[in-house]
Amino acid sequence: MQAVGPDKSQAGNAGEASQFLTFSLGAEEYGIEILKVQEIKGYSAITHIPNAPPHVKGVMNLRGTVVPVVDLRAKFSMEAVEYTKFTVIIVVTVNEKVAGLVVDAVSDVLNISSAEIRPAPDFGERVDTRFISGMAGVGEKLVVLLDMDRLLTEEEVAAQSGAN
């Protein structure tokens, strides 16, 4: 009984805690609100779509649903790397649609209170940071928290609606 009381008061003082699935792209760590994550799959066959932007890898069949797949390295203009046994597809919900995100590796699930989240840095108009919901310090590293509803455009997740 005593353990429940302090936890509730700490949560009230520190702000509401949220869980984030963290993953890596190179040396950087990113986080997605866990409620947006449907599942994590090993990298599997992707059907390429002609004339798609370079970061849209194509589509995959997820239990009968056609799901668009976006390579976050390409979306973030990072150097391409060979996929490894750690490369995974994080299946997420974006604006009530499903999409897959190719990432280097999944790291952890973190509890982060709203008090620990710092605003995204403002780099001016030259750097688009609309899809960053904030930054959280975890040990010596900063985790970039992504806003899934702003990360992918409607065109990037439209493949599903056209197939259903």
Image (cartoon, helix red, strand yellow):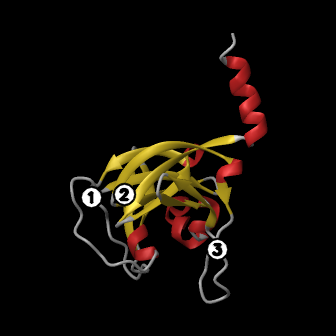
The answer to whether 5 is drawn above or below residue 46 in the figure is: above
Q: Position of residue 73 (x, y in %)?
A: 39, 71
* Residue designated by label 1: 45
Q: Nearer the viewer, mark 1 or mark 3?
A: 3
The answer to whether 73 is drawn above or below residue 43 in the figure is: below
The answer to whether 157 is drawn above or below residue 122 in the figure is: above
Marks 2 and 3, Cα distance to the nearest angstrom?
A: 34 Å
Residues at discs 2 and 3 in contact (Cβ within 8 Å): no
Residue at the far front: name it.
Answer: 140
Q: Position of residue 158 (x, y in %)?
A: 55, 66
**What residue is drawn where x is 67% and y is 88%?**
125
Mark 1 or mark 3, earlier in chain: 1
Marks 2 and 1, Cα distance to the nearest angstrom?
A: 7 Å
Circle 1 residues within 10 Å: few <14, some 14–19, many ≥20: few
Under tag 2, what secondary structure? Answer: strand
Q: Is residue 60 left or right of residue 76?
A: left
User: Which amino acid, by three-letter code, is at mark 1?
Assistant: Ala
Q: Position of residue 20 (x, y in %)?
A: 54, 47
* Residue designated by label 2: 60
